[in-house]
Image: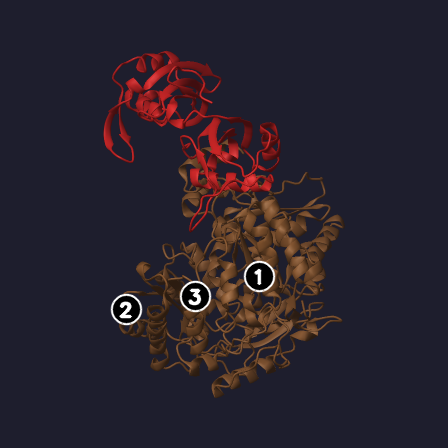
Amino acid sequence: MNETIERILPRVQKPGRYTGGEYNSIVKPRGKSDVGFAFCFPDTYEIGMSNLGMQILYGVINGMDGFFCERVFAPWPDMESEIRRAGLELWSLETQTPLKDFDIVGFSLSYELSYTNVLNMLDLGGICLRSSERDSLHGIVIAGGTCAYNPEPLADFIDIFSIGEGEEALPELLRAYRDAKTAGLSKQEFLRIASGIDGMYVPSLYDVKYAPDGRVASITARSPAPAVVKKRIVQDLNRSYFPQNPIVPSTEIVHDRANIELFRGCIRACRFCQAGYTYRPVRSKSPEVLAQQAEAVLKSSGWQELGLSSLSTSDYTALSGLCDRLLDFCVPRSTSLALPSLRTDNFSIELMEKIQKVRRSGLTFAPEAGTQRLRDVINKNVTEEDLLSTLQIAFRGGWSSVKLYFMIGLPTETDEDVLGIADLAHKALKVWKEHATNRGRGARITVSVSCFIPKPCTPFQWEAQCSMEEFERKQALLRGALRSRAVTLSWHDAAASRLEGVFARGDRKLGQVIYDAWSHGAKLDGWNEYFDYDNWMRSFERCGADPDFYAARQRDTDEILPWSVVSCGVDTGYLLSEREAAYRGEITPDCRKACTGCGAASLLEGRDCDEPA
Amino acid sequence: MSRLEFAKSGKAACISHLDLMRTMSRSFLRAGFLLRHSEGFNPHASISVALPLPLGHESDCELMDFKLKEAVASDEIVVRLNRVLPEGLTALRVTESSRPFREIEYLRHRVELKYDGGTPAGAADTLTELFGSDDITVYRKTKKSEGDFNIAPCIKEKSFSPLPDGIRCEAVLTAMRPMLSPIYLIAAVERYAPALSPSFVRYRRIEILDGSMRRFE
């Protein structure tokens, strides 16, 4: 570690975030012509290191001959001012190499409110922000992750977006980069080659024209870029790379545990859920592979908690048997299981006993809406009876606190639906009163209410988002209806949700707003203490952009959507039919009951969607 | 009860006490050793570290007590731990010790005062004189109290020697009754000899001592 950095560390909070040196982190000996990849996560170390995708791609790239991958995270403002004052450049944790010295800089985009962090990290790393200002092949800036399903708001800053799963796509892109570097190609020549790789979207090769009212009039791909970029997927999860030797942070992170991934995709079709559509088709890992990977990752990391991750863990067909196998290994090591995504319609006493074998973690369920009518509209497909009987099992089993997640501002929502949330919380409390085995500790029902944000690639991608005032009115309505002290209400900030709504369905014109807001100090917008809504509104005004045009406007179904240049494999016609079903309050069965032909199965080669694990 | 002596330096100096406990119990598991766990609602490994080291300070002599579920030779514990510890943590030796941590009386510290503009002339002499006084009062804040505090009685030994870019101070300070952090040596410099205020300071624990100034193990 150089002495300038060493001197800064005692002055900043949580200095361990900036040093690297964690167990299993990789410092590769470098050959002269090796290609360096900076894996950037546009949020703090504690958040970024909790991301399984990062651990996967870090291992994949470092496993490639001739390539090395190092990590970079967004510094907290105390560190940022130290970096700027000392005239340093944001560095990688592994070797303290400035960001600008890497061949490729890649960002993982998990949520829209991290966009200003992308700009800030580039700036701190000594890299020009706009793609058009960067002429050299060296320092290509790429991005992937969930937000890449609408890449347009960041199109000015990112050279290449990788759409979909990166395990195979990223190595392909990196090899093409190395060939281009060896051949001495220009950046422009490389970008054209990259646009020919499946799943790669090169925004500078697309001309977007706008109608006078601001809507997209046309998107034209320039040869050889494809008209629509289809996402990449891994065909066989059993054989795809899994990080058995993950980096184990020496300082506490948000999800401080080992993770195995049971399956990708989701058999449910909750109409608000972007992940539910974009991660299709459903592909499971076999219990044998999972048990082997779990053992390996626990042995290699020493973590004493194992997360069984997926979009809906209780939908894994072999879950019960898998848990038994895992517990045989975990119990003697005092290692507990964490099942973060459980549904109320298939939670059992048996499963409950398994997950509390070593230590009891919290229980969280997501009814999402307060009335059956609205749950049918969003196709959540759980009933009040499901929830209450699940809670009965949990309370009888000794749990006394439970978290319930809801959304407000869903399409067709009425005040009755909002009040239904309070009603459901009170019914949950009643179940506790009747069935609690542990009354002395009191009940704690946490009702967490977020603001619905229409997202691309979902049946609600055409909907108007609730106004901020309306969100706040609904929040107040709910607050007034919750009377018990045992029920705690927490809610998401309406202003932040509105901004997220703007960028989720934004177009390229928002690039200048992001730039302007960043240059006026916006950063860490996902953190309450730094989110400054008024600053953002001033930027919209300066740039002549109207946030309501993006968030609060219902789109016509024939409008050219900015993100129509990428495809997650689900047909737009299918999304439209789901939208119509939502308005009729009709539910769509899960994929195991009947295939409803969303189109994502066409991404599979020589296999079926949701083949038995 | 077994006792691990370990060093904590470089990047590991930025691991806080709580994080160190987690890192250690994970490292034992990685090395293939099962630690005994407490019973109860939220079982945790029964390990305890003597005299938590302040964040950012280095040490050659940290002590941690632990119990394994099965007996393992001391040397093997050291070898296998060193394969799985993060950068900056080094297992030095494992002993079976019955002496409780409360018999620790002193800590030997090495404090390096760095001067960017060159070491001021006569610094070592001035510091020797300053710390020879029997009244060295600084503002001290602990969990229980804050206010002026005379650190002189807590300084058992001290010596100052020049380095190419600063001064090296070796000092034996009380460790328990009361615990005097070496940061108060610098606070004293800043108060009594502000011209000698360093640009940067490195702190390192060298040795743990008992009441007879013998090495505590």
Which chain has been coloured brown in this picture? A
* CA separation in Å, label 3 and label 2: 20 Å
Residue B209 image-quadrant placement = top left
Q: Position of residue A198 (x, y in %)?
A: 70, 65
Which is more foreground, mark 3 or mark 1?
3
Q: Colour of chain B?
A: red
Q: Is residue A491 above or below residue A249?
A: below
Q: Amino acid at mark 2?
A: Ser
Lower position in the chain sequence, tag 3 or tag 2: 3
- Residue at which label 2 appears: A484
Q: Residue at x 60, y 81 (%)?
A: A574
Chain of the residue on which disc 1 is drawn: A
- Residue at which label 3 appears: A394
- Residue at which label 1 appears: A145
Task: Report the side of A374 relative to A247 (left or right).
Answer: left
Q: Quick one: SS at disc 1?
A: loop
